[in-house]
Image: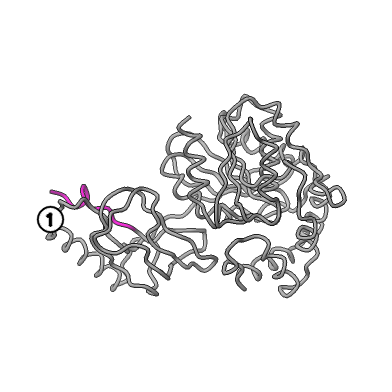
Amino acid sequence: MSTEDVITKVAMPKWGLSMKSGKITAWFVAEGDEVAEGDDLADIDTDKITGALESAGAGVVRRIIAETNEDVPVGGTIALIAPADVPDELIDEAARAAREELDSGAVDEVAGPALGTVQVDGRALSYATLGTAGETVLLVHGYGGDKNSWLFVQEPLSARATVHAIDLPGHGDSTKDVGDGSLDTLAGALLGFLEQQGIERVHLVGHSLGGAVVTAAAAREPGRIASLTLVAPAGYGDAINAGYLRGFASASSRRELKPHLVHLFADLGQVTRQLADDLMKFKRLDGVQQALDRLLGTLLDGDRPGIDAVGLLQKFAGPVRVVWGRADQVLPAANAAALEGRAEVTYVDHAGHMVHMEQPSAVVDAVTGALDG
């Protein structure tokens, strides 16, 4: 019997381009526990954010290799899952090898997403690609975000599909020029990316502003879009936290920014100094402030939403799924009422506006459902 055939090695994931190692802050399972696919195994602290590692399959937790608060390099085996009838001798052999690998530091490097850039309408658009299987998924971030905000979603989806995460104009590593900042301009950038990549059919996933962008793209070229998954999307419903958006745009120091970031998460422990520092580094790049200010004019009409995505959605007849955190303080979950009868809506407990970072399995499940048709 081959250990590779019967024993699943739970590895430290690579959540983000810069991640080299992670620390297990808590185990949610013990040896002997039965787990199903999607069950939380452990909390992992990265250099950016803490997230829950989910089981990729079903079985019994036979050995826990890495201890709580131990730094483990990406790719290192932290636990073993196998059916209950797999002999202990095989488990012991695999556990010894895994522990020796961690102790020696001789862990094979895990390849992260492949980075690329395309030119669309004179703008350089940066993207990251993970996976080569099946259909194609494109992840589109929200206002002030970037492709790395999908770090907990892109990896699990890559087992099923080719998954691209893109930086919209004005964000991440893309050109900071947003033109007139209109929804149509942003949707055009998205469709230009698909054209440049030769992608004829795609499942679009959009968060917040990105939700409105993917809706606009589907309205323009509905035949190219296989499905929409909207994550706390802008442009639906009448409620919007204009104070947060203006405060985020105008903050010129970490001290000014941090009080606004508490509106993003249900778990305030996610609002770390590192998060605020990273966002301030982004906001200080040439052209970013002008881009954020211009896009703010798209998002807001006074203190009301400046986007009507409901009308745009009427031009797309394909399947639509929606994921919304019940504790969203930026675009309240009550806005989902605008999608009643048109979309399959999932409300997620213990999640705020960044539901794809706090409860990523809900988003993964929604996109997987779209892939399954």
Q: Position of residue 356 (x, y in %)?
A: 56, 52
Give the colouring mode of the picture: one colour
In the displayed structure image, the side of residue 248 where residue 262 appears, left or right: left
Residue 74 placement: quadrant: bottom left
Where 258 falls versus 228 (above or below)?
Answer: below
Residue at the image point whose x is 73% and y is 34% from the top: 310
From the viewer's side, name the closer residue of 281 and 272: 272
Q: Is residue 325 left or right of residue 361?
A: right
Question: Number of marks in the image?
Answer: 1
The residue depicted at 19 percent of the width and 52 percent of the height is 84
- Say what secondary structure mark 1 lies in: loop
The kind of residue tagged 1 is Pro
Residue 58: image location, x then y, percent: 30, 48
Q: Is residue 18 left or right of residue 278?
A: left
Magenta residue span: 1-10
Residue at left 39%, top 67%? 73
- Residue 16's spot in the image, x, y percent? 51, 58
x and y percentages locating residue 4 in the rendered image: 22, 50
Residue 286 in the image: above or below residue 162: below
Q: Is residue 90 magenta?
A: no
Residue 183's image quarter? Answer: top right
Specify the farthest residue to the right. 302
**Label 1 crowd (10 A; few <14 / some 14-19 / many >=20):** few
Which residue is label 1 attached to?
87
| Closest to the observer, 123 or 24 | 24
Q: Is residue 373 above or below residue 252?
A: above
Q: Is residue 3 magenta?
A: yes
